[in-house]
Each structure stands twice: as C-alpha cells, then as structure tokens.
Image (cartoon, grey):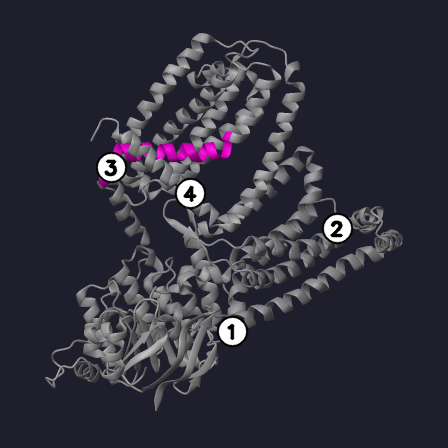
Amino acid sequence: MTAIETTDLTKQYGSTTAVADLDLSVPDGVVYGFLGPNGAGKTTTMRMLTSLTRPSSGSARIAGVPVDDRQRLIERVGYLPEEPPLYTELTAREQLTYVAGLRDLPEDETSRRIEELLDRLDLADDADRRIDAYSKGMRQKTAFVQSLLHDPDVLFLDEPTSGLDPRAARTIREMIDDLAAEGTTVFLSTHILPVVDEHADTVGVLYDGELVAEGPPGDLKRQADAGAGDDTGGAGERTLEDVFLEVTSEDPAADEATVEGATDVR
Amino acid sequence: MSGSGWIRQGFAIGRTEFRRTTRSLRGDSARLALLGVVAVLFGLMVLAGAWFILQFGDQIPAGDVSNVIRGSVAIQWLFAVFITAQRAGSRHHSIDQESLMLLTVPVRAVALGLLSAECFRALAYLAVPVLLLGGAFVVASASPLMAPFLVLAVLLFFTTALVLGFALGLLAKLLVARYRVVAEHKSAFSFLAVIVFVGGYVGLQNFGGQSLTALLGWLPFSWIVDLAVIGSPFSGSTLRAAGVLVGGLGWTVGGVLVVERLGVALWFGDTVEDAVAAEQARVDTGSAADPLAAAVRPIPLPMISQPARRIAQRSVVVARRNPQRLSFLVLPVVLLGVTLVNVAQAGVGSLLALLPPLVVVGLPWLAGAVFGLNPLGDEGAALPTTLTSLPSGRDYAVGLAVPGLTLGLPVVVLATVATGLAGPYAPLETAALAVLALVLTLAAVVIAPALGMAFPRYDPVRVGSDREIVPPSLSAVVLYSLTLGIPGALAAAATLAPAGTRRFLSLLVGGLLSLPFGLLASQGLDPARGVVTWLGQVGAEIATIPVPAVRWGGYILPLAALCLLGIWSFRAVSRRFRNHTLD
C-alpha cells in the first residue's frame, strides 16, 4: 500500500509558489529523506500533508485518507515540527498525558507507553520537571515521543535530531529504523545529510518548491557520478552532499548535468 | 583605548538601544494604537495646560519657593526613581547580546549605554510636554532668562532619578542572583516593594498634608526647583540651586560608576537563580497516575470526555503556573476597583446599590476572559500538535468553556445573591439577577473563545525579565466586552430600575442617536431630517411603554439574545477549530 501519495500538489501564497506540482509516491514502511535548502518548501509540504495548510491545488492522500479530511487523517499521522510543540508550563509527563488524552487513547495503556518511551530516551528522571527548565535537546526528545505516542502509520519529522547530543541523536535514529521496520513510514526532513544517507530508503530533493531529484541514495550518487562524467562506475566517489549541491545549484551547467544524470524528476 | 572612548561607545550603545526600542514599537500595531490614544488624550491636556498658562500665567503672584513646592517635586522625583528601578530590575538582569557587548566594550560603556538609552526613552515621552508647558510659562511670565535653567533642571531631574533608579534595580537583581532566599521569593518581594511604594505615593499625594510634603522639601533633589526658577518671578534659594547643580552632576557621574560596579558583579558573577529555577521546576504531582488530574486539584472538573477534560486541565494548569498570562486583566480589574472606591466615597448605600449589577456583569466577563479570549494564541508552539491530535471541535469548545464554568459559575451566582440581598433590592429582583448572572456566565465562556478565535493574536509580549506572553487582541477584548456588557447591563438595569432604563433608552434613541442626523439635516441633507423625525417618534414611544413591560422585556430579550449568541458561539468555536490551518 502507498503511505503517501500526492498528485500535482501545489501551494501558493499570493504570487509566490511555495510548492509546485509535487508528485510523490512513498510506500509503507520506508524512511523517505526529504531534503532541500532553506525556503525550498519542505515545511509547507509537511504542513499540507498533515492538514495544517490547505493546498492551493492538487491532491494528497496519507495512508489512503485525503489530507482535507483532518478528523480521519490525524489518527494516521504523527508530526514533529521544527519547533518542539510543547507547553512550557507543563512537565514532560503531563504534556504526553495531555496529548494522549486529546487522542482519547486508553489511559492505562498510554501511561505504560509513556514510561517506556521516556525511559528509552533518558527522560524519565526529568519527566516531572517543567519543560521551561529543559534544554533544547530535552524538549526535542519530549516532542519526538509525543509525535509517535499513538503509533501513527506515517510519521513526519522536521529536523528530529536538532539540538540533541550524539547519544540522544543516535537513539532517535535507531528508533526511526525500528519504526520503519515495524511498518511505519517515516518522512524525514533534515539538513544532516549523513543521517539521510544512512537511514533513508529513498531521498527526494526539493528546490524552489519543485522536486528536482528522487531515488535511493545509492542510485542518486551513481547517477551523479555518471552525470559528472565520472566513468569509474562505482558510487563510492560521490557523496549525497555532492548530489544535493548539484541539484540545488543556480549554475545552469550543473543543472544540465543534474537533469541528464542524477534525476528524471525535473 | 583613550580615556574618553567609553563615553563615545556608551552613547553609541544608547542610541542603538533607543533605535531598537522605536523600531520594535513601530512593529507592534496594538501598542502603537494604544500609545496613539494616550498621546492624543495627554496631548490635549498638555495643550490645554499650555493655553491656560499663556492666558493666566502672568497673573500668578510672584513669591518664594516654599518647601511644599520643593516637596511636591521630590515626590515626583521619587516616583521617577521607582519607575526606573522597576524597569531596570525587570529587564536588565542580562543585557541584550551580552557576549558581544561585554567582550567588545568596557562595562562602563555598557552602563552608560543602558542609562543613556533609558534617558532618551524618558525624553522621547516627556520632552515635548515639558518644553510646551515650560515654554508657555517662560512666555507668559516674560522671563526668557529662565529658559536655560529650566532645561538644565529638567535634565538634572531625569538623569539623577535615572541613575539612582537604575542602580537600585540592578542591586535588586544582584540580591536575587546572590541570595537563595531572595531568589526563591522574588515575586513576593517584588510585589511587596510595589505595594509599599505605590501605597506610600498615593497616601502622600492624597492624605499626606502640607507638613509631610514640606518635610520632603529638605531632600536635596527637591532643590531642582530652585534651579528651575532662576530668572523667573519666583525666588528660590541660590545656594540650593548651586548645590543641586554641582551635587547633581557629581551624583550622575558617580551613579554611572556605581551602575558599572553593580553591572560587573551581576553580569560576570555567579547566580543561584538557575539552581532555584531547576528546583522550582520540579512538580510534586508529576508522578501521580494521572499527573494532569493531580495538577488541577482541588478544582473539581466535571465528568466529560477525555479530550475535552484534557483541554480543560491544561488551561487550568497553564494559567495557574504562569499567572502572568492573565496580566491583561489587571487594567479592567483596577478600573473596577477604582470605580468601587469612588462610589464608596459617596456612601455605603451607593456602594451596596451598585455592587449587584457590577458583580452580575463583571464576574461573568472575568470568567470568560480568564481562559478563553485568545485560545489559538495561548496554544503557542503547541498549536500544530493540538490541531493534529484533537479530532473534535466540539471537545475543544467544551474543554475551553469548562474551567470558566467550574471556577466562575459558583462564585458569580453566590456573589450576585450575596450582594443582592445585602443591597436595597427585593428578593425577586435578586433572584432575577442570579438567573441573569448564570446565563451571562454560560454565554461568556463560549463567546470569549469564539471572538478570541475570530480575532486571534500570536505575537508575544515580554513580561518581566524572562517570560513572554501572548495577550488577547484589542479587538477581541473590546468586542467581547461589548457583546457581554450591553445585554448584561440592559437586563440588570431593566430589572432594578425599569423607569430609569426607559428614560435612558428614550433619550438614547430620540436624542443621542438622532444627533448626527440632526447635524446632517442642518447641512441641508433632507433624508436625514426624516430620520431625525422618525428617531424622535421612536424615542417618544419608548417613553410611553409601561414600566412592567420595560422590566420584563428589558430582561427577557437580552437573556434570549445571550442564549442565541452562546449557541452560535459554541458552534463557531467548534467549526473554527476544525477548519483552522496555519496558512
């Protein structure tokens, strides 16, 4: 089954096009790395896919549910925005209890799940402190737990490892892999390219609102090798960073190389 | 660095800080609008004062400057010290761009920069009024020689008050940073300081009498008035004028050095505040089976669906732990208090008569405003989570209404019955007021969020040194007050004073409403003449309505309107939540 399906998804703010004719087809249980420079339209795309922003045109379905049906959609999706969506006056435990309650999850079961997740992310000892006393990383971890409390089919993560120390970042990455292995589709937006390289099954690169490259990281690197005239035949020479820089370059020469080689999207 | 380099740097910092203040003000339309209203009112008063001085200034009898006059100036000087201390104590614990400033220029330059910025801000508000009033006096009394001394005195007034106030504010912050007991109870200490000073100030102004004011005339800074009147028909003490000039300049320079020392101690020293904050951040009820339910105890929230209950619990906990969110309520509550004090001065009977209708309208207003006037703004960063977690708009509307109902309804009804029985009203009238209070509260808790969601505000304002809050928009507050206040006041007035209400309505329609049409008619606009005639007839007809009909009609119609508005508002909250996006 397809977890994320969009057709000509477009968002315009007045005369500015934030996202243009986006076509995505992401299967179940994969990690989709969503890359793009600042202002490329990544957050707008995620907001459209979570019903927080109305598309100007086109359509999108998440786990088979149209994005304009918020009531049904929110059972299927989890969303971690870039700014942790928390009430700083609450404690982590209160915050998680609150969000689970909004979803009307069974209280006993939720309580156990909250404790498990707090424990896994080393938050249990601080879970009774108000969030306004938390570090950025602790807030990020709390918000991450919050986004997956209801076991969503599709999880949208915007810079999930931002502000985390290496150990916590690793735990989050491991949890992303575990989620995908259990069938959850993870839509991962980040600027940390090695994370995408290591964990994403498929990578999509958004530039100026358009999807300019898409494919498994290895394929993209191989195609970029070929597009750049590298005839070594292996994918070991080029990194995902090289691919990213090429497909998001203003340089027409680099653009051409990209179109020919790395992507058939643009 | 040259010896005077820090002075140049200090004034450069001051100019930049002042520019930042004006830019942030320009970007805040609500504050700008409020400031505009105050400026117009204050400006009219100043212009009237200047005109009065120009007309009658030459008739003011010349004489000696007395200690009472000096004492009056001293009171205002102490007030300026207090305001500056408050601002410094709440805003300058850590300076903006701390690492940049402290690693780029000497602390003395930073101290001078902050002081000069504060001076520029004070002058921006007060320079024009002072110059207008002072200039008018100089012209009226034909004493041009006075002008430079007046300017000097005004500058000395501000600079001496500012350096002391700033030093006291930083000293208070230093005590908070160093002493655990002060840090633990800083809000209480701060509140106490405000009460003591404001109480003393108001007491001195209203009940102090001339002898106490004259006593303050011995304070050296009251001698500023002796400097200000040089060259005028008034005779001050030359010795005092010279003393305050030399002493004031020395005081200002010394003040900058003291602020520098305090700044070094504060900005480069250790603080216990972080440890205290970490301790205070721990919540005792956190480890309970249901931590949110434990956190709202002992408030008994009713049995409602879990999602609605969670919204209600969160509203209560957030308001309880961050009462600064409710600071927008201070002004209306103070205005209500002032009104009651003024009425009480006319006699206890008047107070007892006025209390029931005030309670009937005021308390339901409060019950709705506390939790519901800016629900989307109150969500802050958590708004995306609430929108993508709660499937039902109905639960959202119920959750927002429940805290105001649970806390407000018993208080409103009890207070209405108690004040009604204590007042000069019959039991039936008190019962009618109690029903009105009930309906008003039910309506308030849904009308407030409906208007708050229609006119949301998301821009935070800084309260104190470390908290940002998002107050409701001015439009929401005004519309909410009118929507609740007009039918509430009409129903209460019709119940308690139907004949007076009838006369008021008759004059309102036949007189006040027809006034603009009358003006248009006088300009030759014939259709307006017809409207005036029609409004006059309606006004006259209102005056003939039987009193019982006014009483029951004036009571039932507003009540019915409130019920309909309440139902519409509940649906509006539900619908707006379901359809809200972050576009």
Q: Chain of mark 4?
A: B
**Dot placed on the residue nearer the N-terminal end, 1 or 2:** 2
Q: Is residue B12 left or right of residue A221?
A: right
The answer to whether tags 3 and 1 share a subunit is: yes
Q: What's the mark number on residue A43? A: none
Q: How many numbered marks have been drawn onto this rendered protein structure?
A: 4
Rounded to the nearest angstrom, the CA distance separating label 2 from label 4 is 46 Å
Residue A99's place in the image compared with B377, above or below, is below
Is disc 3 in contact with disc 2, using a CB cutoff of under 8 Å?
no
The residue lying at 28 percent from left, 67 percent from top is A141
Cα distance, mark 3 to mark 1?
53 Å
Range drawn in magenta? B104-127
What amino acid does circle 1 point to?
Answer: Arg
Q: Earlier in the sequence, mark 3 or mark 1?
A: 3
Q: Residues within 10 Å of mark 1 (few under 14, many from 20)?
A: some
- Image mark 2: chain: B
Residue that label 1 marks: B578
**Label 4 sits on residue:** B21
Q: Mark 2 against mark 4, which lies toward the viewer?
A: 4
Real-space CA distance between mark 3 and mark 2, rounded to the nearest whole angstrom:
65 Å
Three-letter amino acid code of the residue under disc 4: Thr
Q: Secondary structure at mark 1?
A: helix
> Horizontal and vertical percent for residue B240?
44, 11
Which label belongs to residue B105?
3
Mark 2 secondary-structure assignment: helix
Respond whether the residues carrying marks 1 and 4 are from the same subunit.
yes
